[in-house]
Amino acid sequence: MLNAAIEMAFVLVGAAQVLNLYRLIRGPDMTDRILALDTLGINVIALLVLFGMRTATTAYFEVALLLALLGFVGTVALCKFLLRGDIIE
């Protein structure tokens, strides 16, 4: 039963990635593209966690945590650049 739920989650997260990729390419403005990139990173983290559950390995959880930290810092840097034109004041 758990394997079927994990497989269904893989399919649904994959569909969410396709929709985020569409928004990333066709976004009307830059803020939509930044949000789509952030959401795409969250979906990649979800796939890593699902793959870690499927293989019962803890290494994927650590990689997902590092990717979450980098994604947060990257999103903050992109938003700051969009608002002010520079990252470091």
Image: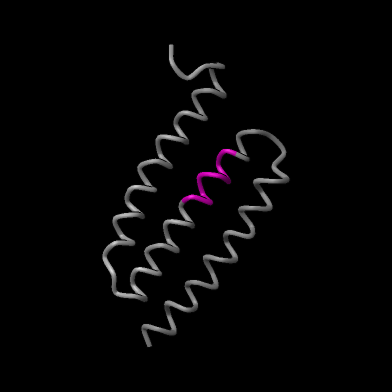
Q: Please say if 14 is above or below 65.
A: below
- Residue 36 lies left or right of residue 66; in this view the side is right
Residue at image location 33% in from the left, 72% down from the top: 53
Bounds of the magenta segment: 34-41
Residue at image location 62% in from the left, 40% down from the top: 33
Tell me if residue 38 is in the magenta stretch.
yes
Residue 8 at x, y = what percent?
Answer: 49, 77
Residue at image location 42% in from the left, 56% down from the top: 45
Q: Please say if 31 is above or below 41.
A: above
Q: Please say if 76 is above or below 18.
A: above
Tell me if residue 47 is in the magenta stretch.
no
Rendering colour mode: one colour
Q: Residue furthest bottom?
A: 1
Residue 42 at x, y = what percent?
Answer: 46, 52
Instruction: State the residue in front, 30 or 53.
Output: 53
- Residue 58 lies left or right of residue 42; in this view the side is left
Quarter location, residue 15: bottom right
